[in-house]
């Protein structure tokens, strides 16, 4: 079955990037000239997704404004002959059918996904974490959707992380299937050192069947007192199996300060308008480092 729906949980408090995220959602922090959330919506659209639900919360309305029309600005851009910019601001509003729902309390990623129940209905859907921007020539959401369409099982986007990082993420037990595809047989969220199953972690994307909702219904708060999506995914993996895709792409964690800087530098270097000047600037700067 083809995956055409995606949800983007973006209701978190963003405490790791305070004070920047106090009044601006971290998902709206720019990478060169576009907010993080736009890269994610573009990846979804390039992956064949047509309907997107963004899970928001108090103070997150700039995301809705970003994907809405701006008649006054548009008129001004046209009147001053800035057709290129006009196209850019209008195109953003036409990319997909985007809807919004509020998660009224920040009870965790599992709870945020739960808020999408009526949007999802009985269909499989992609979950694209709102603070994970992944740049790839092959849209990563699409890599996962194709695996879902082949195996008919939940799919997790996975990557190996360092021994330090795994303690803050989820750790998976995996068995190879072929190339970058794995069977996921066990997982644990924020493991202690002696609980680490492998350095493979779920990073930024997954595709789930609607039956995850009947699991989330009884999932108890886990690590950090939050309802963890990983706990529900573990139950699903035990019940019917799960596929891991070691995706091709570079992930930038916009929920942490270093990730924001890495994204700006690497996307900046590849940018058609400012890339060359930025490279020259960095080369000069690096002499003094
Ligand atoms: P994170 O745990 O990285 O986001 O969740 P956070 O809670 O904003 O982070 P810190 O620790 O306070 O800095 C991953 C994704 O899930 C969303 C977040 O917005 C982020 O995109 N999320 C998390 C929700 O939508 N609701 C929640 O209750 C928790």
Image (spheres, grey):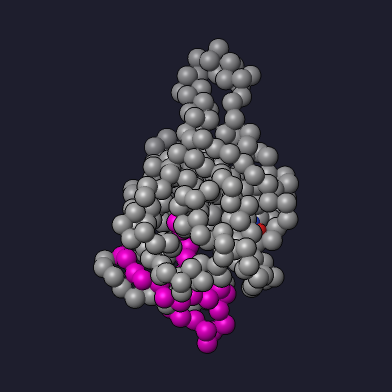
Q: Give the answer, above or below, for where 21 lies relative to 65.
A: below
Q: Main secondary structure of the magenta part?
A: strand
Res 210 seen here: yes
Q: Please tell me how many numbered marks the rendered image carries.
A: 0
Which residue is at 26% across, 68% downward? 178
Which residue is at 33% across, 60% downward? 151
Examine the image and state in which quarter residue 37 appears.
Answer: top right
Q: Within the displayed image, which quadrant is ligand 1 positioned in?
A: bottom right
Q: Give the answer, above or below, for where 256 lies relative to 41.
A: below
Examine the image and state in which quarter residue 251 appears.
Answer: bottom left
Res 26 seen here: no
Q: Position of residue 88 (x, y in %)?
A: 49, 28
Drawn side of residue 113 relative to residue 6, left or right: right
Which residue is at 58% across, 55% downward? 113
Judging depth in this view, the residue of 103 and 285 nearest the camera is 103
Q: Is residue 191 magenta?
A: yes
Magenta range: 180-207
Q: Position of residue 68 (x, y in %)?
A: 59, 30
Q: Position of residue 60 (x, y in %)?
A: 68, 44
Judging depth in this view, the residue of 54 and 216 nearest the camera is 216
């Amino acid at each position: 079955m083809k995956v055409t729906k995606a949800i983007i949980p973006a209701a978190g408090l963003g405490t790791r990037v305070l004070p920047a995220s106090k009044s601006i959602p971290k998902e709206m922090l720019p990478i060169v000239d576009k907010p993080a959330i736009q890269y994610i919506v573009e990846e979804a659209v390039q992956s064949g997704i047509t309907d997107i639900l963004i899970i928001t919360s108090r103070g997150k309305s700039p995301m809705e404004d970003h994907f809405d029309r701006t008649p006054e600005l548009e008129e001004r851009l046209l009147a001053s002959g800035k057709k290129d910019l006009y196209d850019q601001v209008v195109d953003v509003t036409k990319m997909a059918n985007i809807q919004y729902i509020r998660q009224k309390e920040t009870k965790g990623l599992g709870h945020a996904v739960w808020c999408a129940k009526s949007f999802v209905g009985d269909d499989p859907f992609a979950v694209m974490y709102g603070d994970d921007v992944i740049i790839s020539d092959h849209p990563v959401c699409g890599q996962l959707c194709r695996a879902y369409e082949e195996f008919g099982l939940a799919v997790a986007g996975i990557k190996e992380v360092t021994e330090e990082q795994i303690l803050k993420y989820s750790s998976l037990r995996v068995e190879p299937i072929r190339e970058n595809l794995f069977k996921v047989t066990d997982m644990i969220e924020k493991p202690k050192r002696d609980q680490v199953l492998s350095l493979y972690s779920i990073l930024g994307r997954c595709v789930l069947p609607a039956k995850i909702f009947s699991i989330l219904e009884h999932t108890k708060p886990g690590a950090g007192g939050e309802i963890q999506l990983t706990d529900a995914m573990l139950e699903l993996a035990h019940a019917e199996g799960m596929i891991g895709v070691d995706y091709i792409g570079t992930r930038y964690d916009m929920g942490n300060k270093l990730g924001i800087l890495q994204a700006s530098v690497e996307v900046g270097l590849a940018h058609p308008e400012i890339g060359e000047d930025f490279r020259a600037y960095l080369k000069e700067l690096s002499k003094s480092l």
